[in-house]
């Protein structure tokens, strides 16, 4: 264990939460990425919650019994000198198994993920927080498949969540913000169309320089989904762009 801790100790940070858990943040791990013509090397961190009293060594010792493959862990891709650069773009991206992995055209998630990675690399500095417990705006993947079936019967995305007994949006940004605060104290510019994400950042006391809307990837199959976000969820941006 001593040998292992000599390697890992400086790569693990324990971040305080207000409850009985802490966040264990691990990284950076060098992550070279290639997506078609796009290539860049990011620094990657992952995090999970752990018992409040655990030391770094106890965290490492307890991971085999934590069944982490059955839960969801979030992560962050960092680009450039994220701590010191004056201007950093960030994206808090809610996991979308169908859009991000399969390239589903029922939503714009895959487009937003890949476009924001390019924007951050073009800008020279930033981070993408990939929030793994946000699937379906917080209802989970299985429930999202049920919601999609209802949407095929004329429910919109918000109505489908409600019909299944969920709130429209139950996502929390608290842990992501705590991680962000460890990685950077200077102001950030958020890539989003969602005012709730912007409010969460501002309320946390984090310095927010502004936001950049990201509309695109519009198709016949996601047009209604995007319209509903503008009409019912208050998403900001260029509404006139929403015509295929
Ligand atoms: N419940 C539900 N969730 C969906 C649907 N389509 C995409 N999602 C999820 O919606 C989340 C993304 O939320 P969006 O409302 O698209 O966008 P946002 O994150 O609020 O805002 P942006 O920062 O502008 O992307 C992801 O977790 C997707 O899995 C759907 O039809 N129903």
Image (cartoon, rainbow, N blue to C red):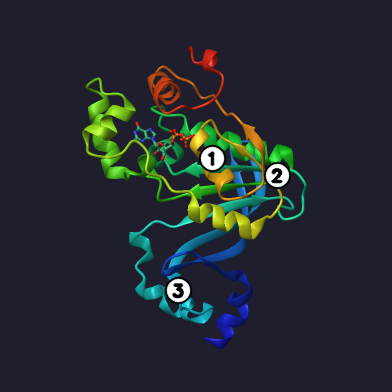
**Residue 30 visible in the current orientation:** no
Real-space Cα separation, disc 2 to disc 1, in angstroms: 18 Å
Dot 3 falls on a residue whose secondary structure is: loop
How crowded pointer 2 is (Cα within 10 Å; few <14, some 14-19, many 20+) is rated as: many
Lateral position of residue 124 relative to residue 91, left or right: right
Q: Nearer the viewer, mark 3 or mark 1?
A: 1
Mark closer to the observer (2, 1): 1
Question: Quadrant location of ligand 1?
Answer: top left
- Residue at the spot of label 2: 88
Q: Residue at x 49, y 53 (%)?
A: 174
Q: Which residue is mark 3?
A: 52
Q: Assess disc 1: are there few (<14), some (14-19) or many (≥20) residues with their C-alpha within 10 Å of its C-alpha.
A: few
Numbered circles on residues, count:
3
138 horizontally vs 236: left or right: left
Res 199 label: 1
Q: Residue at x 39, y 24 (%)?
A: 232
Q: Position of residue 235 (x, y in %)?
A: 49, 27
Q: Earlier in the sequence, mark 2 or mark 1?
A: 2
Measured in 3D between alpha carbons, the distance from the residue under mark 2 to the one under mark 3, in whole angstroms, is: 31 Å
Q: 9 left or right of 166? A: right
The residue at 69%/41% (across/down) is 121
């Amino acid at each position: 264990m001593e040998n292992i801790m000599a390697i890992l100790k400086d790569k693990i940070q324990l971040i305080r939460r207000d409850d009985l858990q802490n966040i264990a943040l691990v990284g950076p791990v060098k992550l070279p990425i290639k997506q078609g013509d796009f290539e860049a090397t990011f620094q990657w961190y992952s995090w999970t919650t752990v018992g409040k009293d655990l030391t770094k060594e106890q965290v490492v010792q307890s991971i085999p019994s934590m069944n982490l493959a059955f839960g969801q862990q979030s992560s962050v891709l960092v680009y450039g000198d994220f701590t010191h650069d004056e201007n950093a773009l960030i994206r808090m991206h809610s996991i979308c198994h169908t859009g991000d992995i399969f390239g589903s055209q029922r939503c714009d998630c895959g487009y937003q993920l890949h476009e924001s990675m390019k924007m951050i690399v073009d800008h020279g500095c930033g981070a993408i927080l990939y929030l793994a417990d946000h699937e379906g705006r917080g209802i989970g993947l299985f429930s999202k498949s049920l919601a999609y079936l209802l949407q095929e019967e004329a429910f919109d995305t918000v109505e489908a969540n409600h019909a299944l007994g969920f709130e429209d949006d139950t996502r929390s940004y608290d842990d992501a913000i705590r991680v962000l605060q460890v990685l950077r104290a200077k102001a950030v510019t958020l890539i989003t169309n969602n005012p709730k994400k912007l409010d969460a950042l501002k309320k946390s006391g984090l310095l927010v320089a502004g936001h950049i809307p990201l509309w695109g990837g519009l198709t016949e199959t996601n047009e209604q989904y995007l319209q509903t976000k503008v009409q019912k969820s208050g998403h900001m941006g260029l509404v006139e762009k929403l015509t295929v």
